[in-house]
Image (spheres, rainbow, N blue to C red):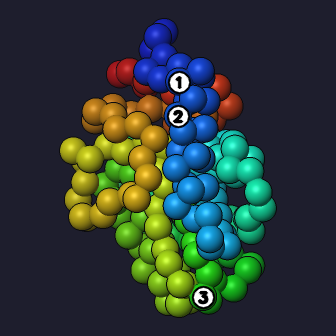
Amino acid sequence: MRLSAAPLIEASAIHRRVHELAVTIAADYADRDLLLLIVLKGGMFFGADLARALGGTAHVDCVRARSYDGTDSTGEVRFGILPEISLRDRHVLVLEDILDTGRTATALLQRLHAEAPASLEICTLLDKPTRRVVPIEARYVGFEIEDHFVVGYGLDYAEQYRNLPYIGLIEA
Ligand code: IMP
Ligand code: MG
């Protein structure tokens, strides 16, 4: 397994898209207080950049959910950290790195719904719709991609490559 030489998505394209998403989200939530929930660890850079691009003020908290081991979805979702802020009656926007099979996001939403938020939506940087096992859609999607294993800008392969400023491909 190695990193391909050419980026799949350049840092400049990510930057532009994050700012476009921020404009859309800021307009959609103009009259509502927003609670951003960054899904660690993959969503850390996307979440940090999007939160700052939004302007204004928002509550920010983190959750930790994982279902991956190497490049294989284990199907089992575990929660490490849960939000410390109460979600009750709040407008919650979950910031994810990627929707793949959809299992992680589905389990996470189920867990968060139990706290009775006023609204609950997903914003994902990347979406691999052809890989979906559980039907779930994000309200906001940065980029739709094909069925590749990707790394960078928060996404890892065995904890490596998260700090790449672009999205790269892992090749066999
Ligand atoms: P799902 O539960 O299959 O949708 O997987 C979602 C999680 O798997 C993401 O939050 C990532 O942490 C991880 N994941 C899925 N696809 C990739 C990938 O291409 N590269 C790195 N991590 C991935
Ligand atoms: Mg993740």
Sequence order check: which comes first, mark 1 or mark 3?
1
Q: Is residue 34 left or right of residue 169?
A: right
Does residue 43 appear anywhere in the picture?
yes
Q: What residue sits 35% from the left and 22% below the top?
A: 172
Quarter-of-image position of residue 107: bottom left
- Closest to the observer: 158 or 132? 132
Asked if residue 21 is positioned above or below residue 152 in the image, the reply reads below
Amino acid type at image mark 3: Asp
Q: Which mark is residue 13?
A: 1
Q: How many marks?
A: 3
Asked if residue 149 is positioned above or below residue 53 in the image, the reply reads above
Decide: marks 1, 2 in contact (CB < 8 A)? yes
| Alpha carbon separation for disc pair 2 and 3 | 29 Å
Helix, strand or loop at disc 2?
A: helix
Q: How dense is the environment of label 1, judged by Cα within 10 Å: few (below 14), some, or many (20 and up)? A: few
Q: What residue sits 59% from the left and 47% below the top?
A: 22
**Quadrant where the image shows the N terminus:** top left
Amino acid type at image mark 2: Arg
Q: How dense is the environment of label 3, judged by Cα within 10 Å: few (below 14), some, or many (20 and up)? A: few
Sequence order check: which comes first, mark 2 or mark 3?
2
| Alpha carbon separation for disc pair 1 and 2 | 6 Å
Q: Which residue is mark 2?
A: 17
Amino acid type at image mark 1: Ala
State the residue lying farthest toward the right. Answer: 57
- Closest to the observer: 80 or 37? 37
Q: Which residue is mark 3?
A: 89
Residue 81: x and y in percent read 67, 71
Asked if residue 102 is positioned above or below residue 145 in the image, the reply reads below
- Closest to the observer: 103 or 16? 16
